[in-house]
């Protein structure tokens, strides 16, 4: 199923007048405040977020999984689904593959398909948290940190294979997330586990092409519930420094203990030039992988404030690999992703509205009230007409969710693929 331009135009035409009125009102107000609306719209248009290949089927928990039917059953169909999201939102111009869940069979065909849908291949993700069929060694007690040299070698080789796969597709970064850790006190020697991990990462790093980066993701717990080897940003930062200039930390919003100040982490990593990637989601308790902005939209805005500041003031930090890492059990996965993309763009637009010079002078005057007013004035602005304008100028939908529903996309997919599809992955 492919969404044609005229489908989108037809659905836009119904609400174009209301959009234009809302846009004019907002644009006038912002211009009076000194905001360059065109520059802002261009920034929104340039901000593209990768969709992970594992988020296109209905997610599950270990208690069950409920299908929405018509889900993709191979990589080609997954890329087609991203094409649908991208044509409506104009924000999902990249895919992030998880290997071995999504190894391309025909590289040229996959590249051609992605190219025709304006989709790039972003970071490739390795997987040493599950045993693969016919694997010689088991990751039951860890991968890059394992006490067994043979297991570590297998995990290192897997990462090198993933780089090779990504290279054929045009990816430029490898994301490493390890489940390694321990479930009970005494099970692991913390120092040995960390040292083994550092040595293994250095071996992978040696195989990294010059124009690639290695992104090291951290997470405090799960699936190990007593200790995790790369538990926090400090450990990730330490390992990235040990590997070299092309290694960076990756922040996944769900990978923090409750009430962590994620915006401060983002800010410090950027000031050190070591924030390489970002996984968006939201959570109430842990790594819940809920729709971005569904629980703590103000926290997301504060994080974007630091990202915007860092992107402007920290040339030592590279361009970031942005990805949504969310999938849910009770929503149509494509609608879920559309909502996440909207929340990301909204938080970004609001952060761009913050008058950084005014904020700086209020900070220098220790005018705490003014500082808060500046942030909250931006946060309280309804920026949706800006998002709409950015989208429709690029051929996207005024309201991606409404268009998705009025075009009856899910039923179209069910007709095409049938009811019994099973997505691979989590
Ligand atoms: C781990 C994680 C990591 C994995 C993905 C499936 O919790 O965030 O990024 O690759 O989920
Ligand atoms: Mn993640
Ligand atoms: Mn996660």
Image (tube, rainbow, N blue to C red):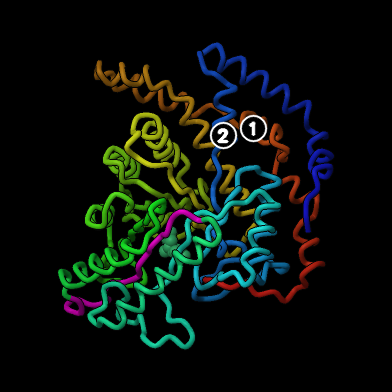
Q: Position of residue 345 (x, y in %)?
A: 55, 39
Q: Which residue is mark 2?
A: 44
> Which residues are drawn in magenta?
171-188
Question: Is the stretch drawn in magenta largely helix, strand or loop?
Answer: loop
Furthest-front residue in view?
210
Quadrant for residue 151, please give it. Answer: bottom left
Q: Quadrant of ligand 2?
A: bottom left
Question: In the image, which disc is placed on residue 390?
Answer: 1
Question: In the image, which disc is placed on residue 353?
Answer: none
Q: Residue at x 82, y 34 (%)?
A: 13
Residue 253 visible? The answer is: no
In the picture shown, does residue 236 fall above or below 74? above
Count how many numbered circles sit on residues in the image.
2
Q: Quadrant of the N terminus?
A: bottom right
Q: Position of 374 compared to 343: left or right?
A: left
Cβ–Cβ under 8 Å for marks 2 and 1: yes
Q: Residue at x 31, y 46 (%)?
A: 274
Q: Position of 365 compared to 416: left or right?
A: left
Q: Residue at x 19, y 68 (%)?
A: 195
Measured Cα–Cα span from mark 2 to mark 1 = 6 Å
Q: Position of residue 303 (x, y in %)?
A: 40, 40
Look at the numbered disc 2 and give the secondary structure of its residue: helix
- Is residue 13 inside the magenta stretch? no
Q: Residue at x 32, y 37 (%)?
A: 316
Q: Earlier in the sequence, mark 2 or mark 1?
A: 2
**Which is nearer the eye, 248 or 323?**
248
Q: Position of residue 355 (x, y in %)?
A: 42, 21
**Which is nearer the eye, 249 or 221?**
249
Disc 2: CA contacts within 10 A as few (<14), some (14-19) or many (>=20): many
In the picture shown, does residue 181 fall above or below 169? below
In the picture shown, does residue 28 fall above or below 83? above
Q: Position of residue 174 (x, y in %)?
A: 42, 59
């Amino acid at each position: 199923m492919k969404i044609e331009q005229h489908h989108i135009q037809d659905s836009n035409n119904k609400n174009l007048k209301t959009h234009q009125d809302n846009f004019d009102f907002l644009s006038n107000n912002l211009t009076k405040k000194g905001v360059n609306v065109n520059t802002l719209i261009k920034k929104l248009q340039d901000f593209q977020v990768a969709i992970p290949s594992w988020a296109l089927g209905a997610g599950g928990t270990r208690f069950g999984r409920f299908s929405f039917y018509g889900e993709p059953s191979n990589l080609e169909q997954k890329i087609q689904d991203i094409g649908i999201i991208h044509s409506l939102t104009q924000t999902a111009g990249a895919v992030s593959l998880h290997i071995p869940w999504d190894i391309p069979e025909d590289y040229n065909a996959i590249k051609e398909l992605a190219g025709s849908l304006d989709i790039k291949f972003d970071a490739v993700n390795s997987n040493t948290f599950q045993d693969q069929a016919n694997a010689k060694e088991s990751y039951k007690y860890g991968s890059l940190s394992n006490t067994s040299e043979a297991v570590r070698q297998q995990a290192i080789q897997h990462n090198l294979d993933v780089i090779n796969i990504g290279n054929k597709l045009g990816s430029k970064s490898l994301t490493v997330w390890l489940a390694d850790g321990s479930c009970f006190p005494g099970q692991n020697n913390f120092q040995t586990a960390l040292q083994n991990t550092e040595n293994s990462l250095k071996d992978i790093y040696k195989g990294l092409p010059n124009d690639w980066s290695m992104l090291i993701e951290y997470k405090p717990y799960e699936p190990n519930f007593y200790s995790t080897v790369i538990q926090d940003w400090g450990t990730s930062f330490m390992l990235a420094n040990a590997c070299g200039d092309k290694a960076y930390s990756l922040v996944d919003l769900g990978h923090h203990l409750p009430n962590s100040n994620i915006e401060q982490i983002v800010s410090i990593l950027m000031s050190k030039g070591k924030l390489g990637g970002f996984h968006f989601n939201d959570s109430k308790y842990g790594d819940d992988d809920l729709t971005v902005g569904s629980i703590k939209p103000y926290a997301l805005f504060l994080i974007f404030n630091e990202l915007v500041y860092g992107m402007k003031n920290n040339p030592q930090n590279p361009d970031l690999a942005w990805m949504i890492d969310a999938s849910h059990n009770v929503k149509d996965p494509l609608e879920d992703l559309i909502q996440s993309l909207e929340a990301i763009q909204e938080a970004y637009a609001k952060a761009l509205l913050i008058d950084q010079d005014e904020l700086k002078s209020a900070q220098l005057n220790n005018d705490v009230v003014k500082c808060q007013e500046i942030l909250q004035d931006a946060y309280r602005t309804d920026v949706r007409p800006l998002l709409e304008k950015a989208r429709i100028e690029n051929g996207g939908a005024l309201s991606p969710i409404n268009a998705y529903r009025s075009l009856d996309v899910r039923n179209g997919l069910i007709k095409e693929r049938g009811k019994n599809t099973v997505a691979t992955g989590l």
